[in-house]
Amino acid sequence: MQLPWRAAPRAALSSPLTLVVSIATTLLLGFVVAAAVLHSSSAGSAALAYQEGRMCTQSVHPSLDGEGLPLADAVPMAARSDLGAVYTRIGRPDFNGLATYGRFGYRPDATAHLTAVQGGGTGLWVPQTIATAARVRVGDRLTGSPLTVSAIYADLAHPVADWWCSEAQDVVPNPLGGDGDSTSVIWVNQPSDLGSLPPEFSSGASVSLRFPTTAPSTLADAEALRDKGNAAVASLGLPLTRTDLLSGAITAARTSERNVSSALLPLVLISVLVGLAGVGTVTVQWAQRRHSELRLLWVRGASPLALGLRGVLELGLPLVIGGLLGLVAARLLLPLYAPGVALAPGALWTALAFVFAVVVLSLSVTVLVAAWRAHRTFQRRARSWRLALVPWELVVAGLAVLAWVRLSRNGLGTALKGAALPRIDVAALTFPLLVVLAAALLATRLLRWSLAWSHRVQWWEVPAAQLALRRLAAAVGPVTGVLLVGVLAVGTIAVGSSVAGAQRSALDSKSGVFVGATSTVQVSQDIALGRVALPSSLRGTTTLVGVSTGALVVDPATFTDAAVLDDPAEVRALISGLRRTGDTAPALRIGRAPDQEIQIPGLPLLKPVASLPTFPKLGTRGYVLSRDSVPAAEQVGSWHLWSSLPLSSLTSSLQAAGIHYTNVADRARVLDGLPFLTVEWTFGFVTAIGVVLAVVAAVALLLAIEVRRRQNAVSGALSTRMGMRPSVLWSSHLLEVGALAALALMVGALASFLSAGVAVPRLDPAPWLNPAPSLPDLTPLVGTMVSGGVAVVFTAAWLALRGIRTARMGELLR
């Protein structure tokens, strides 16, 4: 028999609702698959961008460095790179008889990146520290050389400008180091000037060869730059040490991309299965509406497979269009759900291939389900075997228990401290999602049982509630489906948002504890001895802290102004009570430190009088004593300024006051945050999937209301004709939809918050650092979900009442 090929696509237009549902189903299916591919690709690019942000821009390209070279050999070596620098050994240049330590250097355009204090021009540029110590003035001549001073410039100090970042170890002196250990650079105008230096500087030179380039945005570009750069550096044939920082960044980015991809795989597979189940449901509904036509075709000799192909002729084009729209939506919405917008070459084609695969699977499901339906209906009726009887919630709960065992034993599966980027245990990540799924299945089964017994409930004294309950019982299938998807949506959004937020706060907290404050610098003991006063611009934001082995010396009056603390009031009260009255100094015992008197070199005998579980810089082991308890400040190991200001603000104030410092630390850069970001990006996609499920739940609810439009119109119109007030009818629909939304919100939120609450502390990429991750403030999230639920409820109730208000009684009865 020849099937009506030409009429089938047009026949689909007779049921626009089916078309909309078919397109929406594969749109969401295509979106999830394409978004997973694009998200994984962008995660690799984002990880690369993060690593590059922690690198010096001039060190992205492979570079060369060498030390202990003859000056005559170092100069031509430096000339063979795009940006080569030569530094002489540290000596004692003499200008007018007051020789001090210094070194000479040349780097193209170096003087353009310096700040001249006096003079300028093309002669020697002398740093201000050397000029002050040796009483050098503009116009002075270097002894033993024809070179003269043309400018005095402000010394470079941390943090240096980006142009100097690769040279910081050579151009930034350590003012607290010993004489001759480090010094600022006296810059010459051209490489030939180095040949005019005194003979003592002719040996022991160092050289750096840099090749500035634009940082690559994708892993493919980075690998191409690395290979090309290494080949170019090797072709020079210089006996220098090669530095290839980009290879490490590429390896970390690849690992991060694999971690994200592997973590998303189970979620994507489950989403695909759910989407294919939705396609099967649409196909069953199509078969029910086309029952008469299919029976006629079967009587005329069509096989079940042919009837299945008939379903593809009607539903195939909407399914294909939906898949393509899903790909388009995934690409357009990439900035909203992905960690970056840079995609690897071919990522879109890969996403298209996966979308094509799921579209083919959707068409296959349509054929199989339609053929199975025809076989069951027209050839033989199969025995009833209902999937609803299988205790799926127990199966999922068992999987959740196994995931919890993995999570409790090894957390994320992270490696030990100092190892490479860890490989994340996917089973550990799935625990909170499995708990949400088990709760959703349990809530669905309990609701189905409750509605089956709801006919025994008599609430006619509250007619709005009674009518709402009866309508729910009459549509138990759509109601339980909406509840299932709604609980999954709420739970998935909550899990994704809470875990991602916990990772962000954990990185911030751990870096704060590791550094102690927003920024720190080491200063000389002159500040502790009172010989040098802190600038007024730092008062109220900065404190002086002494660091000895296993102990901190703090100033009770100012410590809480700068330190990163969970409870500043408690810490202030405890350290304010550390007043020394005898030979021993009262101290705070931190964490696992021994609760006994202890002698630390340079400090008095410490006697613990109180304790705290953790403390900035010390972590979970050490002691804290008051600065007033230290008899000799010069005996303390080192002194540091802790500040709540950014590092640039702290150092600029110190530079303006002429205070020397070294060993700077910035809270924003002290820790490698890529392990935290990997988990955050993974659960960020989980949040995106939750938003998709929320849209599915809302659309399903509104479609269910629209499908029951005529039924609601008849019952509503009859009820109003029998005397029911419109306000009661409005309340009834609000109760019906509101109860369903409230139940989904309550079950999803409780399951997600409880599971995330016990899982988040173990989802720790750096368990050797305190504090452990904790749930963030979830009030804004709950408020957003409640607001969205209220909007959906009122929209659904309005749709239900719209048919009643516009219904014509005569047409309804006819």
Image: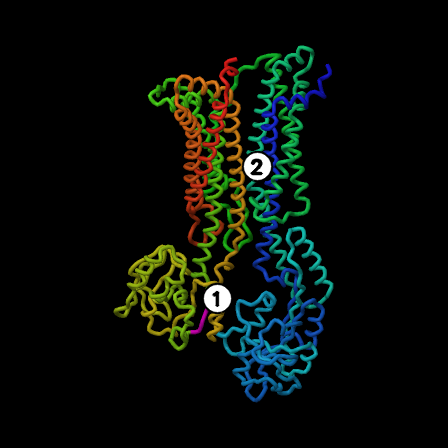
- Locate residue 383: give its quadrant: top right
- Say which of marks 2 and 1 sits in front: 1
Q: Examine the rendered structure and indicate whether residue 101 appears above or below residue 577.
A: below
What residue lies at 50% left-to-right and 59% top-to-bottom?
A: 670
- Locate residue 546: give its quadrant: bottom left
Q: Is residue 504 magenta?
A: no
Residue underneath mark 1: 649
Q: Quadrant of the N terminus?
A: top right
Residue farthest along the left direction in this orientation: 581
| Three-letter code, disc 1 | Ser
Residue 603 disc label:
none
Q: Callout 2: few (<14), some (14-19), or many (20+) C-alpha neighbours within 10 Å?
A: many
The percent coordinates of residue 484 (x first, y second) are 48, 30
Give the CA separation, mark 2 to mark 1.
Answer: 46 Å
Q: Examine the rendered structure and indicate whether residue 64 appears above or below residue 226.
A: below
What residue lies at 50% left-to-right and 77% top-to-bottom?
A: 178
The percent coordinates of residue 734 (x first, y second) are 42, 29
Residue underneath mark 2: 268
Please provide the residue range marked out in magenta: 520-524
What residue lies at 55% left-to-right and 75% top-to-bottom?
A: 155
Q: Callout 1: few (<14), some (14-19), or many (20+) C-alpha neighbours within 10 Å?
A: some
| Three-letter code, disc 2 | Val
Q: Examine the rendered structure and indicate whether residue 77 appears above or below residue 248.
A: below
Label 1 sits on a secondary structure element that is: helix
- Locate residue 405: give its quadrant: top left
